[in-house]
Amino acid sequence: MSSMPAFDWRARLVDYTHLLRLQRPIGALLLLWPTLWALWLAAAGWPGWRLLAIFTAGVWLTRSAGCAINDYADRGFDRHIARTRERPLAVGRIHPAEALALFALLMLGALAVAWPLGPAVLRLALPGLLLAAIYPFTKRVTQLPQAWLGVAFSWGIPMAYAAVRGQVDWGEAGTLMLANGLWVIAFDTLYAMVDRDDDVRVGVKSTAILFGRADRLVVGLCHLGCLLVLAALGWREQLRWPFYAGLAIAALLAARQQRLIKNREPAECFSAFLDNNRFGAVIFAGLVLALV
């Protein structure tokens, strides 16, 4: 009589790692940079280790939760797309119920991390959860899911203001959210350009499909809009010259991305997407130096 194969915990942990993209931190970093921009602006400098640790942990937890719910929503599409067909949910190595359970656990973890920050922050936590949960399903109903993602990826900004000041200055926070939203549309359009042909075939909607041959122009305009809004915010807040130096370097990085995607090759579009980590980092570096 043959025995049942032993449950392989190591293989399951690898699958969970891939589901939550722990091996690919780019998404967490792209979510982290605008949150750090907000923390430093709200605090007019160093926000303290406590807030830095709480928001960094919250970013990683919510991003991982977002990956779980995204793969749950897209499991029927992913198996038909070259880049995603080996994801654990797409091939059946993880059950959909497990992904939902992980999403819930990670969101509860993010709520627990934010709990010490008080009611002003917690009141913003539920809308943030809903934004993350709904985003994957927007790809079925609108050609602008990247705009929804822009709001979801910006929700740490008002939470940072609430944590530092006890209330949200929506004028300042809203301006920063606008800048970040434009940046998100730029980099997630680059990401969508990688899968555009497969997405058209399976019926997934995206700005890469909507913009068509104007994709490079729109990405460039969104990068430019982001930098101009940040420059206006810096002028209003009387930030010192290192902030503008960071914006100038970010502009050069955006120009480099335009060269990378000149021929719209998927690998080059993905490289341009990854390069946005440096875009966010140099803006943050300039802001830190401006507020020293």
Image (cartoon, helix red, strand yellow):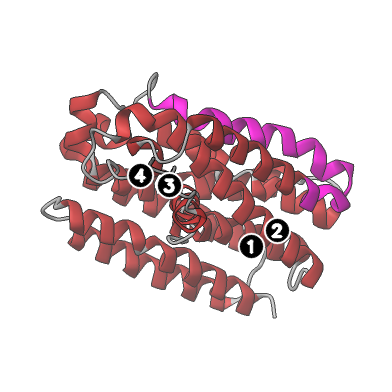
Q: Which residue is mark 1?
A: 36
Callout 2: SS: helix
Amino acid on which the number 3 mark rests in the picture:
Pro
Amino acid on which the number 2 mark rests in the picture:
Phe
* Residue 268 placement (x, y as % from top left): 19, 59
Amino acid on which the number 4 mark rests in the picture:
Arg
Q: Quadrant of the N terminus?
A: top left
Is residue 57 among what the camera can see? Answer: yes
Is residue 147 among what the camera can see? Answer: no
Specify the farthest residue to the top.
141
Callout 1–callout 2 Cβ contact below 8 Å = yes
Segment colored magenta: 112-139
Name the mark nearer the viewer: 2 or 4. 4
Q: Which residue is mark 4?
A: 87
**Membership of 124 in magenta stretch:** yes
Question: Spatial distance from mark 3 to mark 1, Cα to Cα?
Answer: 47 Å
Amino acid on which the number 1 mark rests in the picture:
Leu
Residue 117 to residue 79: above or below: below
Count neighbours of disc 3 (C-alpha within 10 A) and say few if under 14, some if 14 to 19, many if 20 or more.
few
Count neighbours of disc 2 (C-alpha within 10 A) and say few if under 14, some if 14 to 19, many if 20 or more.
many
**Membership of 226 in magenta stretch:** no
Tag 2 or tag 3, which sits nearer the N-term? 3
